[in-house]
Amino acid sequence: MKLLRAHESLARGERMLNDLKIYIQDEVAFRDRLPYVLDLLAGVTRSIADESKGQRSNKFSAWWNGIDRSIQKEITELRHAELKRIESRTEARVNVDLVTPIPQPEPTRMTVEALAANVIHIQVSLEWRFKGGAFDEKPVIDTLEAYWRTARDILAKAEKLLEG
């Protein structure tokens, strides 16, 4: 049995997670998109539960009831905090890296190109982490990508059990 809404939620979740990555350096845009990503990812198992009603075999029910869905509940709570209560459960951390060039052989005459090659570059980036709750201190993108993979695997198993 194909669980169409669960697939749609998974596909949209993946697209919006990829979109979220584009906005890591833009705090407002990142925060605006995060609740939507959280809702879509949590929606995969919600949709499986809804779409499978009335179609469940004993084998499916035993498997479904045994699945640990605590991460889905945490993601739903994060979504409610971020969207409904406007409580940020994430924080951006600034990373500053000094990048030194590869040592160049000593030129006998310094050219502009040689001087430019020996400049130390400063790279500044933001890294988003969860604060509080079950995901405290975990990187947002890595955590959500891992949950997306888990949701994908749960969906595949659910469909397989619903077919047989």
Image: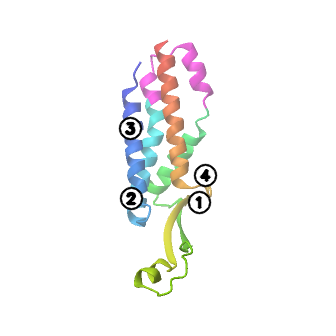
Q: Are marks 1 and 2 in contact (CB under 8 Å)?
A: no
Residue holding disc 2: 32
Q: Is residue 111 left or right of residue 128?
A: left
Magenta part of the chain: 48-67
Crowding at mark 1 (Cα within 10 Å: few <14, some 14-19, many 20+): some
Q: Are marks 3 and 2 in contact (CB under 8 Å)?
A: no
Q: Amino acid at mark 1?
A: Lys
Find the distance from the CA under tag 3 to the CA under tag 4: 23 Å
Mark 1 or mark 3, which has the lower sequence index?
A: 3
Residue holding disc 1: 131
Pinpoint residue 97: horizontal percent, then vertical percent. Answer: 55, 72
Q: Amino acid at mark 4?
A: Phe
Residue holding disc 4: 135
Of marks 1 and 3, the one in the foreground: 3
Instruction: Check disc 3 and report its element: helix, strand or loop.
Output: helix
Q: Are marks 3 and 4 in contact (CB under 8 Å)?
A: no
